[in-house]
Image: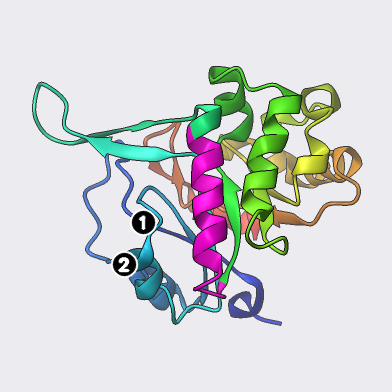
Amino acid sequence: MKLRDIGWIWEGQGLDPGVFPSIFGVGEGAEYFGLDRVQFMFHPNNDLEMRKLSDKKEVVCDISKWKFYNPPQGGTAHQVDSSLESVAREAENVSRLSTNYPNITGAIHDDMKGLVEKSKISVNQYGKIYDALKKHNPNLKLWSVVYTHELDAEVWAGFTPFMDIINLWVWKSEDLVNLEEDLDRCRMIFPDKPINLGCYLRDYTLVAPVPMDRLKHQW
């Protein structure tokens, strides 16, 4: 089995500190890395974008929802609209799109814990997001981003029925040395959930690429 058989890649232009705009358009990052499963981030989910990704085997769409805007001082910035209404609306939008684009297999809630807390979304309310995603296509899976420093069973109590796939990330690359233990903890908290392990190429805390020795440890 090769990475191409199971690997995913984030597609979309983010505004990350210290990183210049990419020369790659939507779908081209996957081509560069030899992958055909993508998580589509940072942009609107609509027909134009989905047509550009129609040749991919699987597409999972962001519902968080990151939006670009023009700040008063000029230039371009982005912010997240994480309200219950916005996320549920985007989840239903993805559900509807999947009826025309069968390679859409799910949605991803990036930074789930932080954004749920930011918008004060309760466990009972979160079910509305899950139901919205399933409204037009009950086979869609909701991917939930979980960081290793958030691996506390009490934090996720009540939310687990609404989490189909755990997308696990190590925020600080210095913590990759604990990856095996963190994976064990993740399996204990989410015993019946598939785990998809994220691999940063850039460490946001260092504002620099992840050191090669740490990448090698993860792989």
**Mark 2 or mark 1, which is nearer to you?**
2
Q: Is residue 76 above or below residue 54?
A: above
- Inspect this view and state whether residue 197 appears: no
User: Bounds of the magenta span?
Assistant: 86-103
* Residue drawn at (78%, 33%) of the image: 159
Q: Could you say which is closer to the camera, residue 202 or residue 193?
A: 193
Which residue is painted at 52% across and 31% down in the image?
Answer: 85
Which residue is the extreme one toward the left?
A: 74
Which residue position is annotated with label 1?
12
**The N terminus appears in which quarter of the rendering?**
bottom right
- 90 is within the stretch colored magenta: yes
The kind of residue on which mark 1 rests is Gly
Residue 180, given in percent of the width and then of the height, sits at 79, 47
Q: Are marks 2 and 1 in contact (CB under 8 Å)?
A: no
Q: Is residue 106 magenta?
A: no
Q: Quadrant of the C terminus?
A: bottom right
The percent position of residue 137, horizontal first and vertical second, equals 66, 63
Asked where in the image residue 70 lies, by quadrant, the reply is: top left
* Badge 1 density bin: few <14, some 14–19, many ≥20, Cα 10 Å: some
Q: What residue did someone put label 2 on?
A: 48
Q: Position of residue 172 (x, y in %)?
A: 56, 34
- 75 up-or-down from 219: above or below: above
Q: Main secondary structure of the magenta part?
A: helix
